Amino acid sequence: MSKVLSSIVVLLFLWSCSAQDQISAISTKELRALMAKDTIQLLDVRTPKEIKLGFIKGAQFVNYFDHNFTTQVNEKFTKKNKIYVYCRSGNRSLKATKQLQLKGFKVVNVLGGYSAWIKEE
């Protein structure tokens, strides 16, 4: 019985690792280059207080901590095109990316978030 349980644990671990590998990511430099040539769906998942400090032009805002986060994203964005998601440092946007991916969105996490964006200016 313990061999079966051990096998299940190993399989779950391998499955979770492969699911993380499927998260697409882009650097802020790559995002700048992309935005220079294309119109994209850009989602800022920071709080209103954080947004007051600055944001990336063209972004739409949905606070990740709102109870109806995915509903708001569904109302503002189309599932046909990729959504590029950023936050302050990249951690919250990674969580949002995973959550939206489960809802059928094509999402790309912006590594380093707004902090990295500002450092490049």
Image: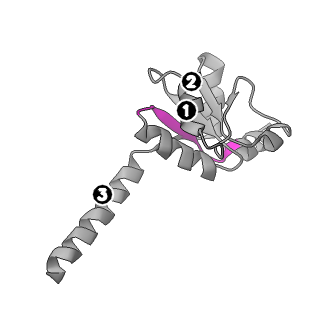
Q: Which residue is mark 1?
A: 71
The part of the chain drawn in magenta is 104-113
Q: Position of residue 99 (x, y in %)?
A: 49, 44
| Vertical position of residue 57 compared to residue 25: above or below | above
x 61%, y 43%: residue: 67
**Closer to us: 68 or 42:** 68
Q: Residues within 10 Å of mark 2 (few under 14, many from 20)?
A: few
Q: Amino acid at mark 3?
A: Trp
- Which one is closest to the eye, mark 3 or mark 1? 1
| Vertical position of residue 70 compared to residue 78: above or below | below
Tell me the quarter of the image containing the N terminus.
bottom left
x 66%, y 35%: residue: 62
Q: Amino acid at mark 1?
A: Thr
Q: Residue furthest bottom?
A: 2
In the picture, measured across the screen, residue 23 lies left or right of residue 68, that is: left
Q: Which residue is mark 3?
A: 15
Mark 3 to mark 2: distance in Å?
Answer: 31 Å
Q: Position of residue 39 (x, y in %)?
A: 60, 17
